[in-house]
Image (cartoon, helix red, strand yellow):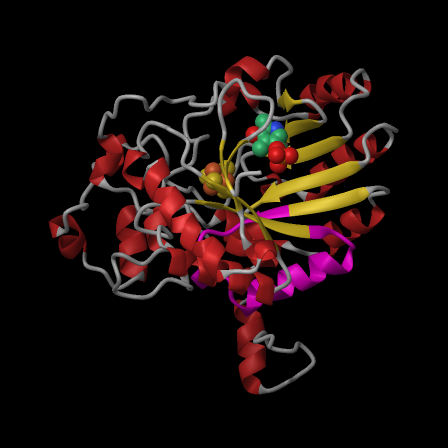
Amino acid sequence: MITRTDPSCQTQNTVIRLDEVKSWQQLLSGSTLTLAELLQKLDISAADFANSIDGDPDTAALDFSIRAPAPFIERMVKGDINDPLLRQVLPLVKEHDITPGYTTDPLQEADFNSIPGLIHKYRSRALFIVTKACAIHCRYCFRRHFPYEDNQPSREMWSQALDYLEQHPDINEVIYSGGDPLASSNAQLNWLSQRIAKIPHIKTLRIHTRLPVVLPERIDSALLELLQQWPGKKVIVIHSNHANEIDDSVKDAIDKLKLTGATILNQTVLLKGINDSSSALVELSERLFDVGVLPYYLHLLDNVTGAAHFAIDDTEAKTIMAEVVARLPGYLVPRLVREEANKKSKTLILPRL
Ligand SMILES: *Cc1c(COP(=O)(O)O)cnc(C)c1O
Ligand code: SF4
């Protein structure tokens, strides 16, 4: 099922294809684009977009740039302004709306951020901000206003966070987060992982990343080697919101990750206009299962300024989920959760215990 060309196959086409192949680093650094460039790649005219009800935001006023790697853009349907992948990265006029109850730090993470680069909010798990960078800028992201500049990760800063881990034996799992931790170099990840591996009470390494989905080329041999060498358990939580995101290149990346012995789960954000129907969610769970991934969380949107147009209210979310529960085996039903600022775990909405 893998569509990639085999490098040993020396047809003329293959040679041309190999010449064109960009490294993941090139694809990553080339993923920022202007609104005009994004629309042009999808054969959508700027005028059509401007005339649509959502169209023509003042891009100069955007505090969150447009970012999407080419392999992800290639999975969008050309000419479709409502494409569910496009909608995740397309800035709309509505982003400038001021909505009561929406703030720039809805989870008050700043309060749990006393050690720069580390968020220790849940007892047994500590979250490491490995890098502030992401390969994709998801317009609904709760971290879109996060003060990353104050948390610019460096080895010096990590040393403090490592000391904190050593002094807290109740932490048994480290979660690499960000930004997207896999937007970091393998050298940085190696440095960090080798140090964490020396702390005896850390049993599990978890990586929260969108890169296996949006830029599967990132799963290179050095990263796989790093995962192989981690002495404990490892969990990779990918982030996919729609079945169309998962093609054979994603399957290929997941297959490689699974060979390292990692458990692979998926989290999704419930988003209006993208996946707010039982059929979209059922299709996503089934597609994930096709590639060997189990659904983990379905998050209700965090109330972050600029994202209110993606919100689905609790009643509607429960109605959609009731249908999902009726249609899928239990192991393909994600847990519908909300994250609340001062809670010691995510709040489970459905299925109820
Ligand atoms: C979601 C989250 C975790 C992980 O929670 P799990 O329920 O174990 O997936 C850890 N720390 C923070 C700050 C989180 O938001
Ligand atoms: S942190 Fe995750 S959800 Fe937010 S922009 Fe980056 S990849 Fe998207």
Residue 177 placed where, x, y %? 60, 35
**Residue 242 visible here:** no
Residue occupying the point 57% across, 60% down: 329
User: Taking 249 as reference, is 308 above or below it?
Assistant: above
Residue 296 placed where, x, y %? 58, 47
Residue occupying the point 34% across, 39% down: 315
| Side of 42 where 325 appears, left or right | right
Residue 342 placed where, x, y %? 53, 17
Residue occupying the point 47% across, 58% down: 326
Where is the C terminus found, in terms of image quarters? top right
Q: Which residue lies furthest to the left in this view?
A: 51
| Side of 301 where 19 appears, left or right | right
Residue occupying the point 28% across, 47% down: 35
User: Taking 339 as reference, is 282 above or below it?
Assistant: below
Residue 218 colored in magenta in the image: no
| 162 and 350: which is toward the camera | 350
Where is the N terminus found, in terms of image quarters? bottom right
Q: Which residues fall within the magenta stretch?
A: 237-263
| 82 and 9: which is toward the camera | 82
| Side of 241 where 212 appears, left or right | right
